[in-house]
Image: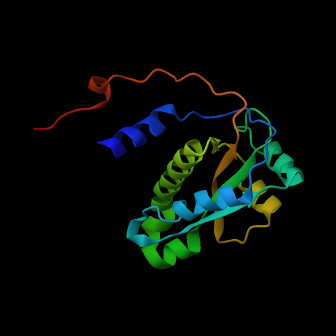
Amino acid sequence: MEKFEFLSNIIKTRRTIRYFSDQEISKDLLIKIMDVTRWIPTGSNLQDLRFIIVYNKKILRLIKMFSPGWIGDGNSVTIVICSDLKWALERGGLYAAKEMYLIHVGIAFQTIALLAHSLGLGTNPIVSFSKEAVKTILKLPENLEPVMIVLIGYPKVVPEPTPRLPLDKIISWVE
């Protein structure tokens, strides 16, 4: 029960952070997060995700120009979660390259967000961005598809929790 309570607290207190402090994030801390993230489950054990970690402020400013979903500011690092669609297609077929990778990205983001929160960091997932612009800016190979941008940094402002629907509104029982 102790593990359940600990994990429940991490999940319930995590927030989307839009404003980050000026405190730098060490690469060691990011490696710690990514080392665990690589253990996420993927359908057919595809392991199709690739992570581009951007520290360069000039590159970050360019990416932000093509990301209307990037709201807020401050000193953050960006993790661009990509799927290697060629890899997914070769190892998992059409379904893996067309749909399954999206589930993998969601699992990866949740893992990154919870680990970051447990270490005092905050995250902000962004899916509203120009994929072509990000591919060009980062000089990504054709097989890598950017799917989500994750801002990660030390929170400057932590918002209050938003209301959640009651269980009877989200669960239906089939007995």
Vertical placement of residue 142 versus 15, above or below:
below
Q: Residue at x 53, y 65 (%)?
A: 38
Q: Is residue 1 left or right of residue 63?
A: left
Q: Position of residue 104 (x, y in %)?
A: 48, 58
Residue 155 image point, x, y percent: 69, 35
Q: Residue at x 33, y 42 (%)?
A: 2
Residue 164 occupies quadrant: top left
In the image, residue 137 lies at what x, y percent? 82, 59
Which residue occupies the extreme front position in the image?
2
Would residue 38 appear left or right of 126 to someone viewing this image?
Answer: left
* Residue reaching furthest to the bottom: 90
**For this view, does 165 lie left or right of residue 56?**
left
Q: Quadrant of the N terminus?
A: top left
Q: Nearer the viewer, residue 13 or 102?
A: 13
Q: In the displayed image of the protein, which residue is found farthest to the right?
A: 58
Residue at point 46% right, 69% down? 94
Question: Looking at the image, what colour scheme do you see?
Answer: rainbow
**Front-lying residue, 163 or 83:** 163
Q: How many marks?
A: 0
Q: Is residue 166 above or below residue 150?
A: above
Quarter of the rendering occupied by the C terminus: top left
Image location of residue 88, percent across then percent down: 51, 72
99 is higher (above) or lower (below) than 1: below
- The image quarter in which residue 83 lies: bottom right
Report the side of 157 relative to 137 (left or right): left
Residue drawn at x 59%, y 57% is 33
